[in-house]
Amino acid sequence: MLKLKHSFINEVYFSMNNLTKTSILLLSGIFFLSFTAFCQNTDNQEKTMKQKLAVVWTSADRDVALKMVFMYVYNAKKNAWWDEVNLIVWGPSSKLLSEDEELQTYILKMKEEGVSVFACKACADMYNVSSKLIELGIDVKFMGKPLTDYIQKDYKVITF
């Protein structure tokens, strides 16, 4: 069977005139070059697309903050695991942050590394800590719409 297919292909090939052979070869080359260019363009797009992360920190657990959230957020930016890193302080975490000097120092360290830090204004107002968070250089604003935008766009969003 294999020999039959092989001889059929040979027979078809040898029965073609040179113009047909040249046309097939030319079209094959154009297809190959187009496909290669498409693959390279796709690779370049992936390399140029910014890798963006938004971390939503809601826990009032100090150990979760120090031994997971803050460590990861800080190192993600410092080691360039992500091009853009955003930390969102939301809910009970805003009260904890306003009271804990070690966490406040860590926030400043993250900001120096280039992490953008935001806090939900509605939550911070409920805990009466908005002014304290603003003193720390945190951008306190209503975060419902920005979080929705992160989720709907190219951001990876994780919550703790």
Image (cartoon, grey):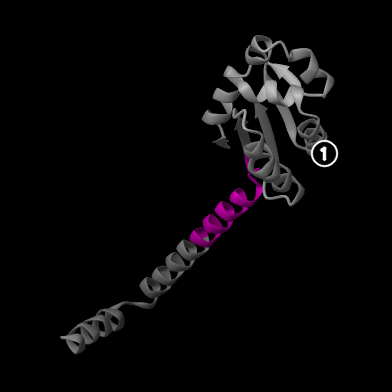
Name the spot of residue 119 as percent of width and height, x first.
69, 22
On screen, 10 above or below 153?
below
Kindly identify the residue that appears in the image at 58 percent across and 58 percent down: 40
On screen, 81 above or below 23?
above
- Amino acid on which disc 1 is placed: Lys
Name the spot of residue 133 as percent of width and height, x first.
77, 20
Q: Is residue 105 left or right of residue 41?
A: right
Q: Is residue 57 left or right of residue 28?
A: right
Name the spot of residue 93 as percent of width and height, x first.
65, 26
On screen, 30 above or below 13?
above
**Quadrant of the snapshot with the N terminus:** bottom left
Kindly identify the residue that appears in the image at 61 percent across and 20 percent down: 91
Give the image quarter of residue 102.
Answer: top right
- Compare residues 17 and 82 and report the one nearer the observer: 82
The region drawn magenta spans 34-52
Can the viewer see residue 46 in this picture? yes
Give the image quarter of residue 17.
Answer: bottom left
Q: How many marks?
A: 1
Magenta span: chief secondary structure: helix
Q: Residue furthest bottom?
A: 3
- Compare residues 35 and 96 and report the one nearer the observer: 96
On screen, 29 above or below 46?
below
Can the viewer see residue 90 in this picture? no
**Quadrant of the snapshot with the C terminus:** top right
Residue at which label 1 appears:
109
**Pointer 1 local density, CA inside 10 Å: few below 14, some 14–19, many at least 20:** some
Assess whether residue 44 is covered by the magenta stretch.
yes
Name the spot of residue 30 as percent of width and height, x first.
49, 63
